[in-house]
Amino acid sequence: MHLSGLHHVTMITGDAQRNVAFHAGVLGLRFVKRTVNFDAPHYYHLYFGDEAGSPGSILTWFEFPGAVRGTCGPGMIHTIRLGVPSSASLDFWGERLAGHDAACARGDASLSFADPDGLRYELVVADPRSRALQALSPDIPAEHAITGVTGVRAYATGALGADRELLTQTLGFTETAPGEYVLEGADGPVTYGYDMTDSPGREGAGTVHHIAWHSRDEDHGAWRERVMQAGHSVTPVVDRDYFQAIYFRQPQRVLFEIATTSPGFAVDEEPGRLGEQLRLPVQHEHLRAQLERTLLPLTAPRATGAAPSGDA
Ligand code: ZN
């Protein structure tokens, strides 16, 4: 039994419209779903990704309007790495981000920047084995489009032995150097690495809430058993409408989720029209009239399916 790769990463934003403008506009990601937080239905939950909303491409945000910026500390993911096709793409993105007043720092093989909430990104050249998870924004050449999440980095403190055991023995990651791991699944490699700090963090805008790994549907129950048998406290299976999920904290306290492939984001919208309308979980549908009054309307850069010709 192997995890397929990453499923999604979920963050906190203080401003949904600004978040949409940056991720769907500047970064050119597909706005995959506009819905509300299952556990706090008066707030948005926004999903971005590739054209199909494929696992491995998905970045999601809970909006808490006006949320104060957080700071990253032990047990928190501090950087998300997104893939691009080539080193020429790093030059393209350096110019594009500078043109949108986003400060960037170019390394030998990376480009670092932050979103408007302060969430840190690194663009890196994607491993060619990774499945193409492209969003096809009309104003971004396909040869430079972002190709999904290639890895994350988290802060840790103290010994990493219990983490190593969970990641390698239970979840099937390979340790490539002390505190550096890779998950080689069917979706392509995803890296997970630690940097050490003793400076405490605080959850808030621009911080990561949790990371979800991708399980085949038929393995999901067995993953829950395996994580429990390894001594971790796991939630029951939770129906998140677009996938089934289980949650547990790893020893450094990063919140992990394992999510299924099915049913996927086209379960309640036409695949070519994802993200256009407010979708509500069944149990919150009775709040629709109220939510349509209280949630600030969002303008997305690509209102209707604008996939260039030749897209499958
Ligand atoms: Zn999640």
Image (tube, rainbow, N blue to C red):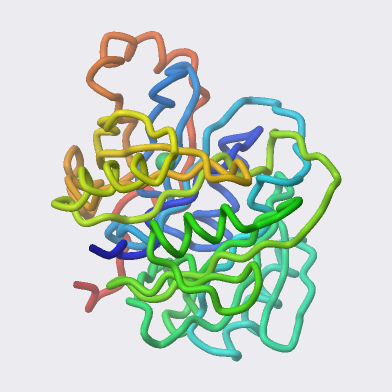
Relative to residue 124, is residue 17 depicted above or below?
A: above
Tally of marks: 0
Q: Is residue 275 visible?
A: yes
Q: Can you tell me which quadrant of the image ligand 1 is in?
A: top left
Relative to residue 150, is residue 161 depicted above or below?
A: above
202 lies left or right of 50: right
- Name the foreground residue: 72 vs 272: 72
- Name the foreground residue: 173 vs 133: 173
Farthest residue toward the right? 199
7 lies left or right of 273: right
- Name the foreground residue: 309 vs 72: 72
49 lies left or right of 208: left
Relative to residue 77, is residue 290 depicted above or below?
A: above
Question: Which corner quadrant of the image does residue 15 belong to?
Answer: top right
Q: Residue at coordinates 64% horizontally, 61% vertically from top-left?
A: 153
Q: Residue at coordinates 61% horizontally, 73% vertically from top-left?
A: 123
110 lies left or right of 241: right
Q: Residue at coordinates 72% horizontally, 64% vertically from top-left?
A: 113
Q: Quadrant of the C terminus?
A: bottom left
Residue 206 in the image: x percent, y percent? 68, 43
Question: Which corner quadrant of the image does residue 277 belong to?
Answer: top left
Q: Residue at coordinates 24% horizontally, 73% vertically from top-left?
A: 311
Residue 97 in the image: x percent, y percent? 69, 68
Q: Quadrant of the N terminus?
A: bottom left
Residue 194 in the image: x percent, y percent? 67, 62
Q: Is residue 139 visible?
A: no
- Name the foreground residue: 155 vs 161: 161
Farthest residue toward the left? 218
Residue 38 in the image: x percent, y percent? 38, 24
